[in-house]
């Protein structure tokens, strides 16, 4: 049930900012935008989430457009260790009457950071 | 050190045998999940549990079974009925929320090979 569109791959020079785009044109008013990443052969790692406002934490910044139909994850100074698949996910806090929200992981964007 | 553990990291079985994958968390989370990942693909939800002694089927539950007898444990059994069991299996947990954003914490995964 993919609700997001991401480019399959991107690359970035070490030390530069990596800007990963995501389209979610059918997002509902109560749905959050989440970003996770998965380093090869490891479990996914939560990065950041947001609803309407831009968000920043120690890992990244999340920029959500005013109409909420797209977002960009920004890694301000990419390192080789940021090479991973990045998943953009939209989900509400509830799913079909249950109190548990579902996260649908698509294929994501393979980000390669080169020296 | 809080987190999720999965064991073993690699598992090999003969076709026709049932196999149980372990998942333990000490994060005091109510909700736990099992995902399957095939090469080059995103994650697909197998089963999830919101609370002890309760669980629901995800998108690809056929050929799998789970139990949730303790809050910290959510083992997954891959039965002989599962047609293509070879995959990377990921366990996750999250605090139980209703209508709010939450993050899922993932274990390191178990890579199952059935021949």
Image (cartoon, coloured by chain):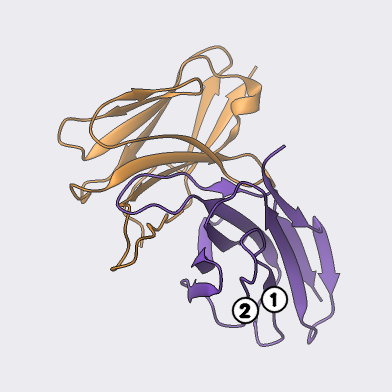
Answer left or right for B4 relative to B11.
left
Provide residue A80's location: percent of width, then percent of height: 65, 23
In the picture, the disc for residue A81 is none
Disc 1: host chain:
B
Chain-order first, disc 1 or disc 2: 2
Q: From this view, report whether residue A49 is shown above or below residue B33.
A: above
Could you tell me how many numbered marks the image carries? 2
Could you tell me which quadrant the C terminus of chain A lies in? top right
Q: Is residue A95 left or right of residue A85?
A: left
Label 2 marks a residue whose chain is B
The chain painted purple is B
Q: Position of residue A11 (x, y in %)?
A: 52, 28
Quadrant position of the N terminus of chain A in the picture: bottom left
Residue with the most extreme left position: A67
* Residue B40 appears in the rendering: no
Q: Residue at x 25, y 28 (%)?
A: A53
List the residue tagged with mark 1.
Answer: B77
Q: Which residue is mark 2?
A: B64
Secondary element type, mark 1: strand
CA–CA distance in space, label 1 to label 2: 6 Å
Front in this rendered view, residue A24 or B103: B103
Question: B61 or A94: nearer the eye?
Answer: A94
Q: Secondary structure at mark 2?
A: strand
Above or below A87: residue A95: below
Q: Is residue A97 left or right of residue B74?
A: left
């Amino acid at each position: 049930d993919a609700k997001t569109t991401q480019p399959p791959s991107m690359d970035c020079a070490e030390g530069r900012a990596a800007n990963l785009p995501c389209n979610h044109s059918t997002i509902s008013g109560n749905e959050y935008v989440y970003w996770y990443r998965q380093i090869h052969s490891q479990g996914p790692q939560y990065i950041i989430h947001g609803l309407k406002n831009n968000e920043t934490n120690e890992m990244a910044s999340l920029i959500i457009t005013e109409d909420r139909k797209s977002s960009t994850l920004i890694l301000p100074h990419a390192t080789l260790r940021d090479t991973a698949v990045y998943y953009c996910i939209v989900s509400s806090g509830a799913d079909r009457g249950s109190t548990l929200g579902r996260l649908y992981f698509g294929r994501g964007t393979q980000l390669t950071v080169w020296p | 050190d809080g987190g999720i553990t999965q064991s073993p990291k690699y598992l090999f079985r003969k076709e026709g045998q049932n196999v149980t994958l372990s998942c333990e968390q000490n994060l005091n989370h109510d909700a736990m999940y099992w995902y399957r990942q095939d090469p080059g693909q995103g994650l697909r939800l197998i089963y999830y549990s919101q609370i002890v002694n309760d669980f629901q089927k995800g998108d690809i539950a056929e050929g799998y079974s789970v139990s949730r007898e303790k809050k910290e444990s959510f083992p997954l059994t891959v039965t002989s009925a599962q047609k293509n069991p070879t995959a990377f299996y990921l366990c996750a947990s999250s605090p139980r929320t209703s209508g709010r954003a939450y993050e899922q914490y993932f274990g390191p995964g178990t890579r199952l090979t059935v021949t």
